Amino acid sequence: MSQVSRSCSLYVGPSRLGGRGLFAGTDIASGDLVTSASVLVLPPEQTGHVNEGLMRHYVFDWTPDAATTQYAVAFGEISFCNHSAAPNCRFELNRERLCVCLYAVRDLREGEELTIDYAYEEFPFDVVEG
């Protein structure tokens, strides 16, 4: 198990996209590691109900191959990133280190909400943009 890290100050607050979101507490340069979060990988036999409830909003697809559906729950603030079709951050799944890393895809300003593309082919819930 390896240590996760954070390169910037972050905070969770009310989001204009709905609910709560993750915000930059300082300016962040494009390409910077914003934060990383350890994950709990759910065994495939325990993922059957994930898409039926609230958890679908908070898991990352950890599917190892076409025959297996698997999810991971990320701990920490990264779970508060809201979806955007034009996200200002991207995430990488690190299966070896069991973590999700969040990177800025452009320069971000202090107070800006951090967003990611959830990468669903068919989005399972309503999205508020703007």
Image (cartoon, helix red, strand yellow):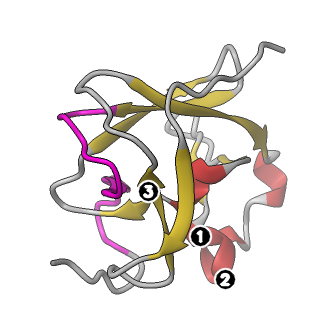
Residue 80: x %, y % from top left: 55, 61
Look at 67% across and 71% down and name the residue there.
Answer: 55
Quadrant placement of the N terminus? top right
Mark 1: amino acid: Arg
Does the magenta portion include 110? yes
- Residue neighbourhood size for the residue with mark 1, other residues' Cα within 10 Å, grouped as few (<14), some (14–19), many (≥20): some
Whole-Å distance between the Cαs marked 1 and 3? 22 Å
**Element type at mark 2:** loop
Q: Nearer the viewer, residue 96 or 31?
A: 31
Mark 3: amino acid: Phe
Residue segment shown in magenta: 104-123
Numbered label attached to residue 56: 1
Task: Give the residue at mark 2.
Answer: 53
Q: Reading the chain from its start, which is encountered first: label 2 or label 3?
A: 3
- Residue neighbourhood size for the residue with mark 3, other residues' Cα within 10 Å, grouped as few (<14), some (14–19), many (≥20): many
Mark 2: amino acid: Gly
Q: Nearer the viewer, mark 1 or mark 3?
A: 3
Task: Give the residue at mark 3.
Answer: 23
State how many labels appear. Answer: 3
